[in-house]
Image (spheres, rainbow, N blue to C red):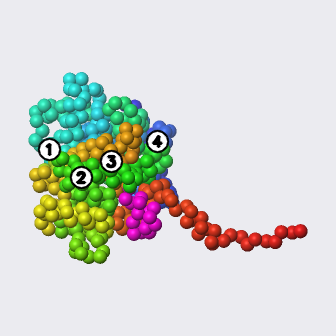
Amino acid sequence: METTYDVKVYKILTYKGARKTTYTVRWVVAGKRWREPFDTVALAEGFRSELIRATGKGEAFVIDTGLPVSHRSKSAAMTWYKFAVEYVDARWAQLGGNSRKNMAKTLTATTIALLRAKPTQFAPAAVRTALREWAFNTNRRPDAPQDVVAILRWVERNSLPVSAWEDPEKVDQVLRAIDTRLDGRQAAAWSRKRNRRILNVAMKYAVRRRILRTNPLPKGKESTAAVKTTNAVDKRSLLNPEQAAAILDWIRRRPRGGERLHAFFATLYYCGPRPEEAVAMRVEDVTLPEPDAADQWCELLFHTATPEVGKQWTDTGEIHEQRDLKGRAEGETRTVPGHPALTRILRQHIEDEQLKPGDLLFQGESGGILAGSVIRRAWRSARKAVLPPHLFESPTGRRVYDNRNTRLTKWLNDGIPPAQVAEWAGNSVAVLLATYARCVEGQLPDLKRRLEAAGDLPERPSAD
C-alpha cells in the first residue's frame, strides 16, 4: 500500500443541472485528481471536512484510493451477504408477497456472482434454494434447517465485501449474472428490467446508509440500452368471439367443476377484471336485476385483489395475499357492467351452488379461494381441446389474462370512450392507450369519412 503526504483539497464545485444540483468534492493525491459527487451540500462538506482533518493531523493518504490510511470505508468492512440480509430485513414489512419473492430472486443471483469461489462442496441448486428461500426470507430465516445453515455460513465466509461494487468489471459481471437464465440464455426483457430496478433500490439504500459513497450501477441511457420493453399487448394473443365461445362451452361441459369454472371464465371474458380480482369477489359484490326486468345487465363491484404468491412470502402463511386494487388508493372500488349473457350465467351459478351473500362467488372444491393452478390447468386443457394445433402453439389466448386483454380491446374497438374503458379496467387512460392502442382496428373507414367531412385546402380554379 503506497502512501503520500502530497495532498491538496479544493473548494466544493457546485453544478446546477436541469433535474438536480450536484456538489462535488475535489482533491489531488500525489498529482492524481479525485472527484466525489454528492446530492446535498451537507454530505459534500462533511466528506471534505474529513479530508482536511486528515491532512491537518499529518496523516498519509493511500495513492490507489485517494483516501487517508485511517479511512476504511464501511463497504470494505461489510460483506455483500451481510448487507443483503440486512437490506431484506429493512424492506420486508414494506413489500407485498410478490415483491418479496422477486427481491429474493435478484439478490440470490447477485450474491452468487459476488462469491470468492464456487461452492464445490454444495450443489448449485442447493445454494440457490438456501439463499432464495431462507437467507432472503425474513420470516423463515430463523427456522432454517441445519443443512441450509451450513450452506449460508459458507456463503457468508466466502462473500466479497460491498466494496467490490467499486470495481466496474465486477459490476458488469453482476449485471450479466442477473440478466442470464440458468440455462445460459438471456432472460426476458421484463425480468432483466425488474432485476436491475430491484438492485438499483438496494444500491440507493447502501448510499443512504453511507456503506457506499455513490450508486455504482450504470445511469441514464447506459442503464437501459440493453433492456427494451413494451407494455403493448400482442394482437396475436386476442381471442375472436368464436374461439372464446368454443373455449367457454368446453369448460362448461368439463366433468369436474365445469359449471363453476365456466362462470369464473365468463366473468373474465365479459367484464375484463384481473384474475386475482375475480377470485376475491363475494356474492354480495354482484347486483343482479329482477328476473322479469327489461334491462338484464348486471353490475359487478371490485374492491379487493388476492394474488397467489406462496405461503412462504406472506405474513399470514396463506398462499393468497389480500390487497387493495392494483394501482388504486387504499379502499378504492370500481364497478363494471355485465352483459345480459353474464347475468344469466351468474344467476344460475349462484342458484346451483346455493351461495349466500357473504360467500366467495367462485370457490375451490373445498370452499376456499379458487386456486391458480386449477384455473391455469382448466384453461390450458380447453385451449388444447378446442383450438387447432397451430393456434394452440401460438400466442392466441395462451394466458388466462388474455381474456382481460380481449375484453378491453373489444370495448375500444366498439367505440367506448377510452376514459370509460380505463375506469372499468382500473387503469389510467395513458396506460390503457399505451397497452391496447395497437389492437384497436376496424375504425379506419369511419375515421376517413370524418376527415373527408372536415375538408382540406379550398380548391382553386385551374388556369386556362
> In the image shown, does 348 or 355 lie closer to the viewer?
348
Q: Main secondary structure of the magenta part?
A: helix
Q: Which residue is mark 4?
A: 226
Residue at image location 38% in from the left, 65% down from the top:
422
Q: Which residue is mark 3?
A: 399
Q: Is residue 244 left or right of residue 366?
A: right
Q: Which residue is mark 2?
A: 252
- Whether label 2 touches label 3, CB < 8 Å: no
Magenta span covers which residues?
Answer: 406-421
- The outermost residue toward the right is 464
Mark 4 vs 3, N-terminal side: 4
Residue 49 visible (yes or no): no
**What element does badge 2 sit on?**
helix
- Which dot, 1 or 3, sits closer to the camera? 3
- The outermost residue toward the top is 120
- Kind of residue at disc 1: Arg
Q: Is residue 261 above or below residue 217?
A: below
